[in-house]
Image (cartoon, coloured by chain):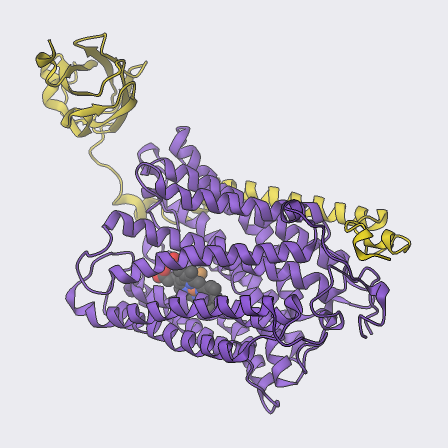
Chain colours: A yellow, B purple
């Protein structure tokens, strides 16, 4: 027999041998055992995938039960600068000087935060033109007295922003409204206006 | 039994020809070869990265690469060597040898086998290609810790995707191997008669199936934290970055045993052959392997002694880690006892195996030093850790791969290995690898942090020695490539039993092993 005549996928058939009950993956008996092994191992793998996620609540429960990393151990990490007795509503506003050039969007809803609590929000900025743009945001506060209580840790307004044509970016700002913000200020407004840098030269 | 005498036992005909052969193959030997060449390619890429790293560290100051690129190099070097070299190489060995060793005609799921391989080049391509993206490749370390990993650019998402693909590939590969071993052994081959390489791979397969999904879960959480506003690990949203370390190392420590158990199997095959004695303490080897695997799930936090765990937890993880030294020690003693009073010959495979026993043990000892919580607080994230894991991974896992290549090349190619070139490869590698990694112990003890492109002047001498060792070690690997290519292209014909002292079913079939073997199951007495 010419070796190349042999069907490489089924050498036993090519040799005229009957299907091997135990050793040939094509034999029904073995195929069945193998399939059931596959199912079992597949289930184990799927369960372990879930287990990875389950570890997060499991650690929480474990630490609650044992007191590990709770109370005293974590006391140092407690933020004593947060005033949990009240909340302040922070309205977020975005303005642009030239709406044909930018689309500048504020988060769609206001944020309620305790004084002293760290707040992170994201604005969005899109270059509507086909040329690169450089711009900068200038913040303002309402009422003006609130300005003294906004402690910005990081803000896009600290830097100028450069956008490629039609680029769209997110602009995070991270701030704390300090504990001493007057009690009668229930609502404050954080507003940014975006100006094109060197925009005057264009016309 | 001679394969030529029993034509039914092995069908002697070639593989299908044409360009589609390798893409569509379901043959375990073809797929084994593919895995091994893939590992070799990634070894070249990861090795070149290491050369760049050592070139930058040759002297203090910044000469060749900028810190951003340096961090990408260390990160990708780690990921590539672990997921692209050691794991695929061992899977390649398993594909070639497991069916031959247990007398099975092929793997249990030949088509899935094809998939598990072909996913790998895709993942490898994503990983390496991500370096070309804007912002460069991942640079947060192979351990992918947040917050850094939550802050990077697009390449971080691609890397997560690559890890998912590699994970899927190794889970499929592991299921295939475990099923083959459990269901397809030749009649008479009971579990306790299986060659030790098969045993170690069976246990490795269980480890893989158990922990690769956990890694997949961890990187999935990174992905959703990055893109879909969840806060599993991002502290700004109430998540816990340390939680990632717990989940990662729950995968990570069993993973280091995934990287070493098949090595134990190879060494336990090579040493008896060239000592011409059966393996000392077979049963204790099996039990030691199993207990290492079980213990490996209980020690993960030894990678996290400095995160601020309660003392009770530190003590638990410290003692549990020290306990692993016991079964590991059993293995080392068994290998030595196998050689004891054997009639040893020093073929290249054996040289690498002996070097493995000596040098892996050094890595085990430095592991014990690191396992002691108070000591680790000093040494964590220093070059001492780098020295430790390179001793266990390079002179451990990689040397076992070299030993396995020299040992089975005659079976794969039908030609004897050129021992002269092999010896040169061995001695150059064995000397240079110690020049490369031993000084790192001193650097670590003196306080040099890992993952830095520049360092203080007092570290200069040892770094220069390490870099020279590194260049020699890198260059020596060209010899290995030459040996392999020479062996494929010709040389003295190897008989079915290529080594005088070799035992096992794989040596009963012709060399090179015919395309189809054990079409008729052999009888194991
Ligand atoms: C006796 C056995 C072993 C012990 C007691 C041991 C102990 C340790 C300890 C305590 C660390 C953490 C050091 C630190 O980050 O501060 C460590 C790190 C490491 N070990 Fe081992 N180890 C052992 C064997 C192995 C083996 C067999 C491998 C792999 C084949 C391995 C691979 C690693 C790796 C890759 C790291 C570093 C991970 C990283 O931070 O990047 N170890 N080992
Ligand atoms: Cu570990």
Front position in the image: A151 or B469: B469
Quadrant assignment for the N terminus of chain A: bottom right
Front residue of B255 and B275: B275
- Taking the image as drawn, is residue B506 in sight? yes
Query: Where does residue B134 sit, x and y in percent of width and height?
Result: 32, 36
The quarter of the rendered structure image containing the C terminus of chain A is top left
Q: Residue at x 32, y 14 (%)?
A: A109
The quadrant holding residue A97 is top left
Residue B313 at least partly seen = no
Q: Is B429 on the left or on the right of B524, as rendered?
A: left
Q: How many marks?
A: 0
- At x 59% / y 88%, what residue is drawn? B344
Please say if B78 is above or below B261.
above
Give left or right: position of B185 versus B445.
Answer: right
Rendering quarter of residue B238: top left
Nearer to us in this view, B359 or A66: B359
Residue B336 is left or right of residue B411, and the answer is left
Across and down, in percent, residue B454 comes to: 20, 58
Q: Is residue B82 above or below residue A87?
A: below
User: Residue drawn 58% across and 80% down?
Assistant: B334
Q: Position of residue B151 (x, y in %)?
A: 32, 37
């Amino acid at each position: 027999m010419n070796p190349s005549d042999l069907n490489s996928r089924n050498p036993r058939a090519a040799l005229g041998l009957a299907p091997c009950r135990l050793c040939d993956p094509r034999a029904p008996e073995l195929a069945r055992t193998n399939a059931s092994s596959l199912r079992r191992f597949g289930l184990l793998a799927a369960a372990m995938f879930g287990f990875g996620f389950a570890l997060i609540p499991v650690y929480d429960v474990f630490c609650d039960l044992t007191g590990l990393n709770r109370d005293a151990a974590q006391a140092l990490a407690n933020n004593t600068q947060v005033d949990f007795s009240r909340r302040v509503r922070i309205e977020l506003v975005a303005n642009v000087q030239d709406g044909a050039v930018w689309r500048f969007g504020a988060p769609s809803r206001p944020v309620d935060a305790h004084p002293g609590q760290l707040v992170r929000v994201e604005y969005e900025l899109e270059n509507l033109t086909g040329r690169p743009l450089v711009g900068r945001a200038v913040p303002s506060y309402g009422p003006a007295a609130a300005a003294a209580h906004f402690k910005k840790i990081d803000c896009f307004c600290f830097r100028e922003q450069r956008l490629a044509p039609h680029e769209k970016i997110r602009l995070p700002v991270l701030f704390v409204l300090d504990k001493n913000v007057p009690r009668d200020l229930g609502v404050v407004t954080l507003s940014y206006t975006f100006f094109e840098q060197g925009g005057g030269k264009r016309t | 039994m001679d394969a030529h005498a029993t034509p039914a036992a092995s069908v002697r005909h070639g593989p299908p020809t044409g360009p589609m052969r390798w893409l569509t193959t379901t043959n375990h030997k073809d797929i084994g070869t593919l895995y091994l060449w893939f590992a070799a390619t990634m070894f070249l890429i990861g090795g070149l990265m290491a050369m760049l790293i050592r070139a930058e560290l040759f002297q203090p100051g910044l000469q060749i690469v900028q810190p951003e690129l340096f961090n990408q190099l260390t990160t990708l070097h780690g990921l590539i060597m672990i997921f692209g070299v050691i794991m695929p190489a061992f899977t390649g060995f398993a594909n070639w040898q497991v069916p031959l060793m247990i007398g099975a005609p092929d793997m249990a799921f030949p088509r899935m086998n094809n998939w598990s391989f072909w996913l790998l080049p895709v993942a490898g391509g994503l990983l390496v290609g991500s370096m070309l993206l804007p912002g460069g490749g991942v640079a947060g370390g192979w351990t992918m810790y947040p917050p850094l990993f939550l802050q990077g650019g697009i390449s971080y998402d691609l890397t997560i995707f690559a890890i998912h693909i590699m994970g899927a590939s190794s889970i499929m590969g592991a299921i295939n191997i475990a099923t083959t071993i459990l269901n397809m052994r030749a009649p008479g081959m009971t579990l306790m008669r299986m060659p030790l390489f098969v045993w170690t791979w069976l246990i490795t397969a269980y480890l893989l199936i158990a922990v690769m999904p956990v890694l997949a879960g961890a990187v999935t959480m990174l992905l959703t934290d990055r893109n879909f506003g969840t806060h599993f690990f991002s502290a700004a949203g109430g998540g816990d970055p340390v939680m990632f370390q717990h989940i990662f190392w729950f995968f990570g420590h069993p993973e280091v045993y995934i990287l070493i158990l098949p090595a134990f199997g190879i060494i336990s095959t090579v040493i008896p052959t060239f000592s011409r004695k059966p393996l000392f303490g077979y049963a204790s080897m099996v039990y030691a392997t199993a207990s290492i695997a079980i213990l490996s799930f209980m020690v993960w936090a030894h990678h996290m002694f400095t995160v601020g765990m309660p003392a009770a937890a530190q003590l638990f993880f410290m003692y549990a880690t020290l306990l692993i030294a016991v079964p590991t020690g059993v293995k080392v003693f068994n290998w030595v006892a196998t050689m004891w009073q054997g009639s040893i010959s020093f073929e290249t495979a054996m040289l690498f195996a002996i070097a493995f026993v000596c040098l892996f043990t050094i890595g085990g000892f430095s592991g014990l030093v690191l396992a002691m919580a108070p000591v680790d607080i000093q040494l964590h994230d220093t070059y001492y850790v780098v020295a430790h894991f390179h001793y266990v991974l390079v002179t451990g896992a990689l040397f076992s791969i070299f030993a396995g290549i020299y040992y089975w090349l005659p079976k794969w190619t039908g030609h004897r290995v050129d021992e002269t070139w092999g010896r040169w490869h061995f001695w150059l590698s064995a000397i240079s690898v110690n020049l490369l990694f031993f000084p790192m112990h001193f650097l670590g003890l003196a306080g040099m942090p890992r993952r830095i492109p520049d360092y203080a002047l007092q570290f200069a001498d040892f770094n220069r020695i390490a870099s020279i060792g590194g260049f020699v070690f890198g260059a020596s690997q060209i010899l290995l490539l030459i040996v392999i290519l020479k062996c494929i292209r010709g040389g003295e014909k190897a008989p079915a039993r290529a080594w005088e002292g070799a035992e096992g079913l794989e040596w009963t079939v012709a060399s090179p092993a015919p395309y189809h073997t054990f079409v008729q199951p052999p009888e194991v007495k």
